[in-house]
Image (cartoon, rainbow, N blue to C red):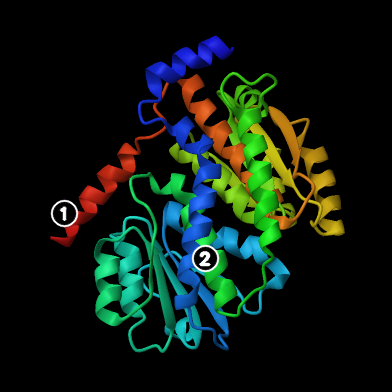
């Protein structure tokens, strides 16, 4: 299998997506340093909410920030994936505007909607029109390195925001938790590297090849990770994927497993589970997977590693990233291009004209 994957990578991974995923530990180090250097520019305050504005690969950092901090937050985090932040939400809030390119239309519009609301603002981006707006308005701007697909810049999107929230007085975070997470992702990168045997990412990709992944998780630490897995399958593997959450899915989705037998036989459920999941949610998980198992094409239950929250979250995320690239290679596609997104953006530009 290693030789086959090496051949497939040479033929199809033109943009070196596997290398970008494997480079996550280095990105962590740089992103952590960037956040630490930017933090003194953040003003602490008595904010009633945190709003993270962004789309796609830039928005998922906000979701993961909420999952990471959990009950340590002193104010709720709300993700805004829209053209405007509602005034009631922006009022007295701390807003992080995240756009990797700095030119995301929805995010720029959301930034503009904040004028006059009294919201405190910071931005995280590589530059673009967002930087120009921030300079004009005197808004603190955290510059991150460019040159990556936004989904490959999750470290740059997430880790500076950890420093930002801590500096704003909105959450506590011990640097030792970062150190533990960095060491763990380095180990996982070695385990998932091309040529490693056994390789958990390759094994999972083989199980998912030709199937439709349903990624399930509980609200909490792995909620955003489940969404990330599905999005990585979409963009890297060029395949449809679905995500849903226990126990909510047991109040609706579970009934959908009653018919469409041919479809269900092609579904593999990937259940992401964490030590901090509520005890009753664990019962929901066991019972619902017991219902689904005779109907689905497969069930994969993955338990997060032991350790602090950042370690558990990032190692689970990274396993999904590697799996999505190996899925692309096994399907004979280049994981980097996102042609349909590029086409859609061009069409939107034509509408704006």
Can you tell which of label 2 and label 1 is closer to the viewer? 2
Tell me what residue is drawn at x 69 percent, y 65 percent: 174
Label at residue 350: 1
Q: Where is residue 240 in the image (x, y as percent from the top left)?
A: 50, 37
Q: Position of residue 59 (x, y in %)?
A: 47, 59
Q: Position of residue 256 (x, y in %)?
A: 66, 44
Tell me what residue is drawn at x 31 percent, y 81 percent: 138
In the rendered image, the quadrant that contains the C terminus is bottom left
Nearer to me, 344 or 181: 181
Label at residue 36: 2
Reply above or below: 33 against 273: below
Q: How far apart are marks 2 and 1 (CA)?
A: 40 Å
Tell me what residue is drawn at x 19 percent, y 55 percent: 349
Label 2: state its secondary structure: helix
Nearer to me, 191 or 242: 191
Tell me what residue is drawn at x 47 percent, y 32 percent: 19
Reply above or below: 217 against 136: above
Mark 2 Cα shell of 10 Å, populated few (<14), some (14-19), many (≥20): some
């Amino acid at each position: 299998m290693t030789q086959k994957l090496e051949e497939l990578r040479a033929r199809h991974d033109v943009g070196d997506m596997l290398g970008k995923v494997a480079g996550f530990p280095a990105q962590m180090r740089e992103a952590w340093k960037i956040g630490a250097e930017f933090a003194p520019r953040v003003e602490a305050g008595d904010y009633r909410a945190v709003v993270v504005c962004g789309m796609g690969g830039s928005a998922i950092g906000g979701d993961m920030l909420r999952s990471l901090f959990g009950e340590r937050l002193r104010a709720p985090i709300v993700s805004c994936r829209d053209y405007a932040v509602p005034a009631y939400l922006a009022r007295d809030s701390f807003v992080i505007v995240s756009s990797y390119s700095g030119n995301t239309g929805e995010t720029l519009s959301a930034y503009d909607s904040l004028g006059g609301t009294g919201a405190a603002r910071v931005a995280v981006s590589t530059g673009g029109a967002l930087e120009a707006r921030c300079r004009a308005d005197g808004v603190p701007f955290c510059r991150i390195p460019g040159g990556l697909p936004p989904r490959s810049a999750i470290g740059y999107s997430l880790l500076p925001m950890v420093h930002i929230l801590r500096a704003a007085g909105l959450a506590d975070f011990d640097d030792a938790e970062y150190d533990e997470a960095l060491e763990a992702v380095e180990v996982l990168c070695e385990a998932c590297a091309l040529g490693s045997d056994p390789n958990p990412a390759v094994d999972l990709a083989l199980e998912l090849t030709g199937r439709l992944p349903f990624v399930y998780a509980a609200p909490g630490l792995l909620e955003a990770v489940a969404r990330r897995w599905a999005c990585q399958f979409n963009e890297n593997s060029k395949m449809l994927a679905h995500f849903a959450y226990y126990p909510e899915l047991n109040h609706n989705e579970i009934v959908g497993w009653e018919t469409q037998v041919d479809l269900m036989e092609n579904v593999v459920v990937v259940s992401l589970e964490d030590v901090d999941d509520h005890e009753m949610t664990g019962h929901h998980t066991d019972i619902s997977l017991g219902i689904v198992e005779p109907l689905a094409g497969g069930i994969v239950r993955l338990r997060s590693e032991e350790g602090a929250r950042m370690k558990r979250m990032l190692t689970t995320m990274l396993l999904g990233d590697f799996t999505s690239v190996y899925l692309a290679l096994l399907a004979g596609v280049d994981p980097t291009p996102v042609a349909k997104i590029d086409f859609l953006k061009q069409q939107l530009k034509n509408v704006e004209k």
